[in-house]
Image (spheres, rainbow, N blue to C red):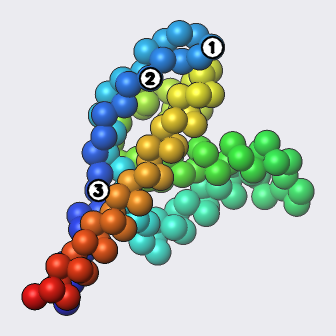
Amino acid sequence: MIDLPKNEHTFDFNEIGEMTGNKYEGKFTVYCILNLGLRHALEVERSRLQRDMMNPTVGLSNISFLLSNLRVRIINGPAWWDESNSGATILDDNIMRVLLDKVLEAEDIWKKKLEDSKKKSEEQ
């Protein structure tokens, strides 16, 4: 049996907001892979953000995807994250996009570790 990598990833965040010039920094800890319960929570949050609209706009779908992923995947973040209602009140779109990229990158890192573990197991 292969040992699965730890399902949490911590990274440093240090970005400047394009609109406000505010500095956003701190450490985030995120889930790398979502289990069934977390995937359910993600879909519930995304549906809640779209208000179950029959025909959401592309913009609404994109915002819902971004916010729901960040809200479900982020385990811990800096004070500014909590104070911004998990990003909802941040004026700098670039901060949210960069943060989402880093959060989703954790899954790629986890999958790479899993592949390395599989190879190591096969070599033994």
The span from disc 3 to disc 2 (Cα, nearest Å) is: 22 Å
Q: Is residue 33 above or below residue 65?
A: below
Q: Position of residue 48 (x, y in %)?
A: 68, 53
Which numbered mark, 3 or 2, is in the foreground of this view? 2
Q: Residue 118 falls in which quadrant of the image?
A: bottom left
Q: Is residue 100 above or below residue 41?
A: above
Q: Sequence order check: which comes first, mark 3 or mark 1? A: 3
The span from disc 3 to disc 1 (Cα, nearest Å) is: 31 Å
Q: Are marks 3 and 2 in contact (CB under 8 Å)?
A: no
Which residue in the protein does label 1 denote? 19
Front residue of this view, candidates 72 and 17: 17
Total numbered labels: 3
Q: Is residue 124 above or below residue 120?
A: below
Q: Position of residue 93 (x, y in %)?
A: 62, 28
**Residue at the extreme top of the image, as rendered:** 21
Q: In what element is the residue under mark 3?
A: strand
Left or right: where 4 falls relative to 25 = left
Which residue in the protein does label 2 denote? 15
Which residue in the protein does label 3 denote? 8
Front residue of this view, candidates 124 and 9: 124
Q: Give the crowd class for mark 2: few <14, some 14-19, many >=20 residues within 10 Å.
A: some
Q: Give the crowd class for mark 3: few <14, some 14-19, many >=20 residues within 10 Å.
A: some
Left or right: where 1 falls relative to 95 = left
- Residue at screen point 60% across, 55% down: 45
Q: Quadrant of the C terminus?
A: bottom left
Q: Position of residue 37 (x, y in %)?
A: 45, 71
- Kind of residue at disc 1: Met
